[in-house]
Image (cartoon, helix red, strand yellow):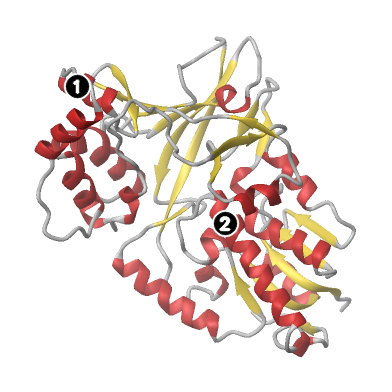
Amino acid sequence: MTHDTCDFLIVGAGFAGAVLAERLAVDGGYRVLVVDRRPHIAGNAYDVPDAAGILIHQYGPHIFHTNSDQVLAYLSRFTTWRPYEHRVLAHWNGQLLPVPINRTTINRFFGLDLATSAAAEAFLNQQAESVAQIRTAEDVVVSRVGRPLYEAFFRGYTRKQWGVDPSALDKSVTARVPVRTDTDDRYFNDRYQIMPKHGYTAMFGRLLDHPDITVRIGTEYRDVVARVRARHVIFTGPIDEFFDYRFGRLPYRSLRFDHRHVATAKFQPVAVVNYPGEDVPYTRVTEYKHLTGQEHPATSISYEYPSAEGDPYYPIPNPANAALYARYEALADATPGVTFAGRLGTYRYFNMDQVVAQALTIYERLAGRRRGHASVLAHACELAELKT
């Protein structure tokens, strides 16, 4: 059997895999093979012109935001940016109200005229329920804004998104969503809120454009492992899949997208409108021209339907799943020659900038081992067949 040889085999061409491939090839001088089962690079950030020529995000809206100077500086080598501040409205009782909740939301929801942040804060304090110990996603919200806002904006949306009631989800799910008492209607607070000017796929193309990086799309890891010899594997797919689900499957939520082209210049006032009511099967509608700044006489949108089946998107955070992941993590730590990265490889609900930061950190660790006292890579200087 003829074997391909490389220093690193990277499974997955999303953010984690592409950043590690670029660093290993450009800074480390290694030969890298990247494989991805999908027929394209860029993972879930993949964007592509639709039949009408409008650039859409195939797997739902991806908005780049970060507070990290390091992450921004690194990615800026591969793209120029356009400024974009994300705004989201929620459809409630025939109205479109800002989310995250701010003073405008409070006033219009309750029919009030609170004029200051102090007045809004005092009102929310009256609404808030006392929770002895905040453990769940429900606890976070009701202890901050009370039951009516929780029922209107969080409970139904969360039940659709995650398939379980917020009372059964870890507090981290809703702790990441801010509540504001001013009228700031931006979805994110980060210092840098921008979009790649020519799209994510173009940025990934530049990340992976190096003579020592070979990319094979539409390629399953299992199909190449027997004929690839590498010093080290970086696996960014589901960690439980790598180990053939030895301890059972880690639960994920999936998504289904209904992409449509609409013969109108503008479909909705902002990029994303949430539909938190359980009487509506989808969670949100995205209009992509808001994100990309394109001009076109028509527009393209997508309806987003959470699902228990399909490609894994979101690790489901609760104690039982954390305990199951801990078993896989221990197995990974005891498996030489393999590093796990990314949202699926480490079963964490990361934002894009967090995945980039993780990948840069992993690279520094691997490079440090190589430069310091010969360990993981130097100990594997003979090319050997990968073990699964």
On the rendered structure, is 207 left or right of 279?
Answer: right
**Residue 238: percent from the left, percent from the top?**
53, 64
On the rendered structure, is 248 left or right of 220?
Answer: left
Task: Please state which of the two labelled residues, at mark 2 or mark 1, is closer to the viewer.
Answer: 1
Crowd class of label 2 (few under 14; some 14 to 19; many from 20; radius 10 Å):
many
Residue underneath mark 1: 114
Q: Can residue 246 be seen in this view?
A: no
- Kindly identify the amino acid type of the residue bearing the numbered disc 1: Leu
Residue toward you, 139 or 37: 139
Q: Name the image quarter holding the C terminus.
A: bottom right
Residue 151 picture quarter: top left
Quick one: SS at disc 1? loop
Say whether disc 2 or disc 1 marks the residue closer to the N-terminus.
1
Q: How far apart are marks 2 and 1 (CA)?
A: 40 Å
The tally of labels here is 2
Residue shown at 73%/36% (left/top)?
Answer: 80
Above or below, 217 relative to 156: below
Residue underneath mark 2: 355
On the rendered structure, is 318 left or right of 259?
Answer: left
**Residue 23: percent from the left, percent from the top?**
75, 62
Quick one: SS at disc 2? helix
Residue shown at 73%/73% (left/top)?
Answer: 225
Above or below, 240 relative to 64: below
